[in-house]
Amino acid sequence: MLLQLLTLIGALGMFLYGMTLMSSGLQKAAGASLRKVLAKMTSNPFKGVLSGLGVTTAIQSSSATTVLVVGFVSAGLLTLSQAIGVIMGANIGTTVTAWIISIFGFKFDIAVLAVPLMGLAFVLTLSKRDRLRNIGDCLVGFCLLFLGLSLMKSSVPDISSSPEVLSFIQNWSGHGFASVLLFLVVGSVMTLVLQSSSATVALTLIMLNMGWIGFDMAAAMVLGENIGTTITANIAAAVGNENAKRAALAHTIFNLFGVVWALALFNPFVQLIEWGAAQLTSDPSTQPIYGISLLHTTFNLINTTLLIWFVPVIEKLVCKIVPAKKKKSDTDEPHLRYINAGLISTPELGLSEANRELVHFAEIMQRGFDYTAGAIAQANNPDGFGPLREKLIKYEAISDRIEYEIVNFIIHLDKDNMSDSSIAKERSIIRISGELESLGDSAEAIGRSIASLEAHDRKLSTEQLDKLATMTELVRHAHGVMVENLRREDRLTDISNAEAAERAINEWRDKCKAEALAQIEGKGEGYFESVFFITLLEALEDMGDFLINISQAGVRR
């Protein structure tokens, strides 16, 4: 009996690992496409449902989709109403797994084909082509999933040889509606512990197939699974912003509402499902198995059909339960706006959050340049320069902090679940973060140079200030081009705009520098001021270099 129990636990582990590996392979193979599907979501709830259904069917994990949606809402890639639609679709999409298990896991012994298929999968994992390796990983996961399911079925004690099991279950099953509630709790707890609604459904199907529980108790466990599956998204949202918490709460409200009406109409609903299963197949041995999958799908379809018309109402309700916090200004303290969802179970798609944060970082540094330009304009006015220098010091600290947090987020993404193209995108994000931080360093260095000029009681000429003003406008334009390029979701194939802006900066620097050096050589006057003038020109030109580097790092090769 102990060996059977250990085998059952091991088989469950194989099933869960297979599910994870299959989902991971699918995510890596379709990561870029999934990013585009969700990032381009419209405000139409019906399209949101279809997108959630499609993504969850593709990656075979409603938990991954819902955690992803929570992260995207937190990052501002999806509105709350869009997220609610996607979550509804994800609930429908996750029922596909139950159908796959019902059809192939019980009616056919697919485990017989799993081992030969594993050989093909292994060959694919050795391929040099990224997509073939990802497909190989997916096939390995598929094989492990059904091998685990087969082992679970064989390791579950047979009622005829272990009648004590039946008597134990019967103690729970013979109390009418109280038993329904009890098995609903069992389904919720199992899903919470296993962190996989698919695993809970698989175990439910096995218990039903082995005769441990009746169809009504299996139906109650499936309803419980719909409650347990909301826990993952709520855990992810716990460290997110208010919008992330609202999306997770909307998921919980959606599923709880469905469970309430299903319990209120439990007997007629179960009878309807049993009738529907009888129409699907005349084989009495497979009718209960198909019935559970049918119940799972019908429940979510009815729930979505009822609630899709009330998305605005659900949105208002969760906004009332989770009120908005007072919004902080970018200059209050160094902070991130988008990367704060916490658990990113889909690293391929977590890069979208990092990319959005880069744009936010770039906008902060663009606003910070206003203080740089102001400090240069006030170079001869100590009273006007003092407050601006404090701003430059503060922005340098902000840039350090944001760069660290973005890079820290990126390096903790699971590299094993990334495609080669996403790893390249990750490196690009790290490089761009460093270049943006360097803008803060340069601005602070400009502040130090002006302070040194003041300390030596020197002043720049009106002509020098005018030339520096022209230079700051050229750099300001380059900032705008850089932000515009970063905002392009598909990244760049042409950065001629950035190259033109950088050429203009270099040409003006060269012209002004040559004139300053000629003045020193010709008249021998104003040497000290000219050195400071050239230093400021060079610092501004350095900013131009960092700005072109950012656009170059974003080029899609």
Image: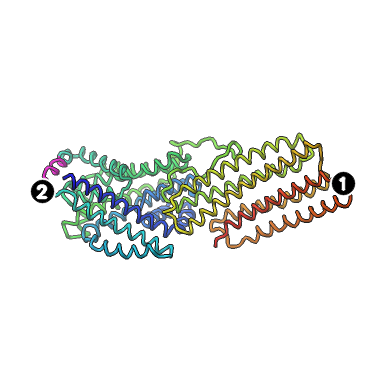
**Quick check: 481 left or right of 290?**
right
Q: Position of residue 159 (x, y in %)?
A: 13, 48
Q: In this view, does 228 lie above or below 57?
A: above
Question: Which residue position is annotated with label 1?
Answer: 525
Closest to the camera, between mark 1 and mark 2, is 1
Task: Please name whichever residue, 358 or 37, is drawn nearer the observer in this view of the structure.
Answer: 358
Q: Which quarter of the picture shows residue 109?
A: bottom left
Which badge, 1 or 2, is on the more N-terminal residue? 2
Depth order, front residue of 501/34: 501
Q: Which residue is drawn at 35% across and 56% down?
A: 22
Q: Can residue 511 be seen in this view?
A: yes
Q: Is residue 268 visible?
A: no
Picture layout, residue 274 above or below residue 118: above
Residue 183 image point, x, y percent: 23, 41
Q: In this view, does 308 lie above or below 30?
A: above
Is disc 2 surrounded by few (<14), some (14 to 19) or many (20+) residues within 10 Å? few
Query: Horizontally, is 103 left or right of 440 in the view?
Result: left
Left or right, residue 518 beside residue 357 = right
- Along the line of sight, the residue nearer the viewer: 64 or 401: 401
Name the side, left or right, on which 32 lies relative to 63.
Answer: right
Where does residue 305 sit, x and y in percent of width and height? 35, 50
Residue interval drawn in magenta: 162-170
In this view, the residue farthest toward the top is 383
The disc placed on residue 36 is none
Question: Which amino acid does the dot numbered 2 rest on?
Answer: Ser
Q: Split into 4 quadrants, where in the image is the N terminus?
A: top left
Q: Distance between the residues labelled 1 and 2?
A: 106 Å
Image height check: is 288 above or below 176?
A: below
Residue 334 part of the magenta segment: no
